[in-house]
Image: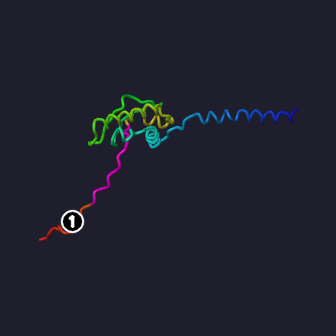
């Protein structure tokens, strides 16, 4: 009887292996740092196409509870000053759709406890950064010492 049990155990293990690995893959990756939270929200964000809106920068302030759901009401706190009303509206909609797609976020217990109820300012950038202005050299304007 002993030789028959070994093949039966291997057969049972072979049947249970796909179930065990499938359940591990079904769980989303847990977010453990603020960098993970920002990356997850940015991965869900799709800016409006340039044919519909010009690129702008927009910043969202939002709080989450321990489970990763939105706590309170998200608020737009910054938009590019040169943006038209249409640009602002299209980007606001895109940011709110990103929140709907991503939330609730899969926080680890430690991260959920650390950021629950705290406002996070999340920038969404579509504009290219302007090159820094060159520093002006004033070698010819040295002050006189009397």
Range of residues picked out in magenta:
120-134
Q: Secondary structure at mark 1?
A: loop
Give the left or right position of residue 3, taking residue 74 as reference: right
Query: Residue placed farthest to the front in the image?
Result: 51
Q: Residue at position x 80%, y 33% from top?
A: 8
Give 15 or 62, whichever is nearer the viewer: 15
Give 91 or 72, whichever is nearer the viewer: 91
Residue 60 x, y percent position in the rendering: 36, 37
Color theme of the render: rainbow
Query: Residue placed farthest to the left in the image?
Result: 146
Please identify the quadrant where the N terminus is shown.
top right
- Main SS, magenta region, reads loop
**Tally of marks:** 1
Query: Residue placed farthest to the right in the image?
Result: 1
Residue 118 x, y percent position in the rendering: 39, 35
Q: Residue at position x 49%, y 37% from top?
A: 110
Q: Residue at position x 81%, y 35% from top?
A: 7
Give 92 or 73, whichever is nearer the viewer: 92
Quadrant in which residue 69 is drawn: top left
Give the left or right position of residue 111, taking residue 49 as reference: right
Residue 15 x, y percent position in the rendering: 73, 33
Asked if the stretch drawn in magenta spans residue 130, the answer is yes
Asked if the stretch drawn in magenta spans residue 116, the answer is no
């Amino acid at each position: 009887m002993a030789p028959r049990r070994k093949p039966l155990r291997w057969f049972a293990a072979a049947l249970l292996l796909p179930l065990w690995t499938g359940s591990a893959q079904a769980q989303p990756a847990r977010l453990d740092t603020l960098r993970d939270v920002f990356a997850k929200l940015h991965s869900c964000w799709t800016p409006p196409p340039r044919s519909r809106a010009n690129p702008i920068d927009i910043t969202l302030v939002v709080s989450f509870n321990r489970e990763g759901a939105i706590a309170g009401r998200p608020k737009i706190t910054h938009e590019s000053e040169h943006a038209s009303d249409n640009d602002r509206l299209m980007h606001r909609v895109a940011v709110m759709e990103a929140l709907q797609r991503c939330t609730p976020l899969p926080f680890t217990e430690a991260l959920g406890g650390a950021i629950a109820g705290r406002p996070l300012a999340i920038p969404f950038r579509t504009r290219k950064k302007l090159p820094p202005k060159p520093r002006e050299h004033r070698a010819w304007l040295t002050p006189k010492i009397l």
